[in-house]
Every structure is written in C-alpha cells, then in structure tokens.
C-alpha cells in the first residue's frame, strides 16, 4: 500500500507544471490563512522554506525536501516535509507545483488531507480563516 501511495505521489509531482513557470519565494494557499515563505533552492535538487501561519495564530515551521523532475528535466515543483512540526499531532508533506496547485498529505499514515491553488503572497486575494490542514 505504501508503494502504491508513493507511486501516486511521484506521478502527481512529475505530471504537473508549466515548462517556463516558477514558484515565487512567498506563496499563500488560496482561501486559507497559511502559506510558504522563503522558498529557495538548496543545491541542485533540494528546496526549503517556512510554512507560515500554519495555525492561523502566527505559528511557523521549517519545511524542506526535493524538487521534482519532469520528462524534460525541468523542475515541476517541490515536495517538502514539515520537519517535526507535529501540527495537530501529525507531520505533513507539501507538494507545491509550478502550475499554481498544491496538495498536502499526512506523513504519519499517508492520508491525503487537502489540495488547492496558490498565489504569490504579493497578490491581493481574500484570505481564509482556517489553515490548509484544519482538523
């Protein structure tokens, strides 16, 4: 079962993204109070940032992981774990794609939690009152 989930996860990460798009360093999850800031490359294949306002009360947590590669060897997005944030008793893994979509699953049991779209933090959009991983 874990192998099937991992294959599905890798397919999702590798199958999306626009060839020339990029993910800005600061994004917000549309309709939610949280987002990721300081998203930056780490070496050739890594990425790291900060999951900001994860509980809508100002709590932040470090996230980091790998950049996904597509057929043309262009990074389509990033796959980042929450590094022990243990939010609501669980750790989360974020998939942030260049096509302005995201998904999150719970690392503890592999359950998909939520998905949606993101926008650059500099764009003015209505913010939600719940985090993307609300209980």
Image (tube, rainbow, N blue to C red):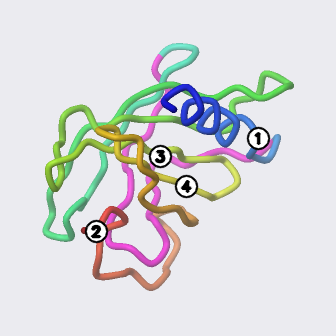
Q: Is residue 102 left or right of residue 113?
A: right
Residue 134 disc label: 2
Q: Which residue is mark 3?
A: 25
* Location of residue 34 (image quadrant): bottom left
Q: Earlier in the sequence, mark 1 or mark 3?
A: 1
Range covered by the magenta-colored residues: 20-42
Q: CA distance from mark 4 to mark 2?
A: 15 Å
Q: Is residue 97 left or right of residue 71?
A: left
Q: CA distance from mark 1 to mark 4?
A: 13 Å
Residue at the image point whose x is 45% and y is 78% from the top: 31
Q: CA distance from mark 3 to mark 2?
A: 23 Å
Residue at the image point whose x is 52% and y is 54% from the top: 103
The nearer-to-camera label among 3 and 2 is: 2
In this view, 104 is above or below 132: above
Residue 102 disc label: 4
Q: Which residue is mark 1?
A: 15
Q: Nearer the viewer, residue 112 or 92?
A: 112
Q: Nearer the viewer, residue 7 or 21?
A: 7
């Amino acid at each position: 079962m874990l192998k099937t989930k991992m294959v599905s996860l890798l397919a999702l990460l590798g199958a999306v993204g626009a060839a020339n798009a990029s993910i800005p360093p600061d994004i917000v999850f549309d309709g939610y109070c949280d987002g990721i800031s300081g998203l930056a490359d780490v070496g050739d294949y890594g990425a790291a940032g900060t999951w900001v306002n994860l509980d809508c009360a100002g709590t932040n947590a470090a996230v980091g992981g790998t950049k996904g590669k597509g057929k043309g060897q262009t990074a389509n997005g990033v796959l980042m774990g929450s590094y022990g944030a243990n939010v609501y008793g669980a750790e989360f893994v974020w998939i942030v794609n260049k096509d302005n979509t995201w998904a999150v699953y719970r690392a503890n049991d592999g359950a998909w939690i939520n998905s949606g779209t993101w926008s650059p933090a500099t764009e003015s959009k209505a913010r939600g009152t719940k985090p993307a991983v609300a209980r």
